[in-house]
Amino acid sequence: MFHEVRVFDGYGSLKGVITKEELSMRHWADENVIQDAKVIPHLAAKNGSHEKRPLPERKCKQCLRKFLALTVNQRYCGKVCFNAVESERKARSLKPKRSINCSECGNEFESRRMNHLRCSDKCRQVAHRRLVKDRNKIMSDKYEKQRELKKGLV
């Protein structure tokens, strides 16, 4: 539900009033509810006058229907067409899957990234734990050799 809005300037004087109908039109513009309206009063002409400026009529790049553009950059008639184009674009940008074998269990799986070497989180965790265990063993052997050298020198 919309209510009338009064717009004031910095000095407190009334600059304009936005009616319930105008607010409703602004709100539902993306949903193609007001496509038969030809003018939105709040869009003033560029020369600073308070005349109503007609909305440019454009063709939707997705469904090719005519619609009234509410912004300069609007290319689609609504969210449905925009979302359809975006989902197509994202699908095109995905890299093709490649089939590789898991370095842990040997199962074949499909990966979109070059650095995926394991088929699941479980295999990734097992590999990481083994890596940490090996690293700790190497470090403990290294420190053990250093301790032996210190004892031999003293």
Image (cartoon, grey):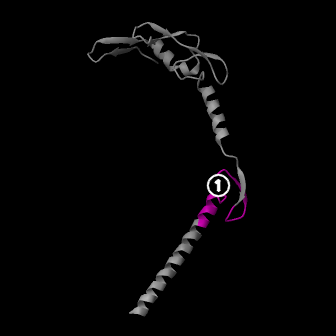
The residue shown at (42%, 16%) is 3
Q: Is residue 147 above or below residue 49?
A: below
Which residue in the structure is indicated by mark 1? 114
Left or right: where 109 falls relative to 145: right
Pick whichever, 14 or 68, lies toward us.
Answer: 68
Q: Secondary structure at mark 1?
A: loop
Left or right: where 103 falls relative to 151: right
The residue shown at (41%, 92%) is 153
Residue 122 inside the magenta-drawn segment: yes
Left or right: where 79 falls relative to 119: left
Residue 82 quadrant: top right
Q: Amino acid at mark 1?
A: Met
Residue 63 inside the magenta-drawn segment: no
Residue 83 quadrant: top right
Query: Residue 62: horizontal and vertical position, in percent?
Result: 66, 25
Image quarter where the C terminus lies is: bottom left
Residue 137 quadrant: bottom right
Numbered range of the magenta stretch: 102-127
Furthest residue toward front:
47
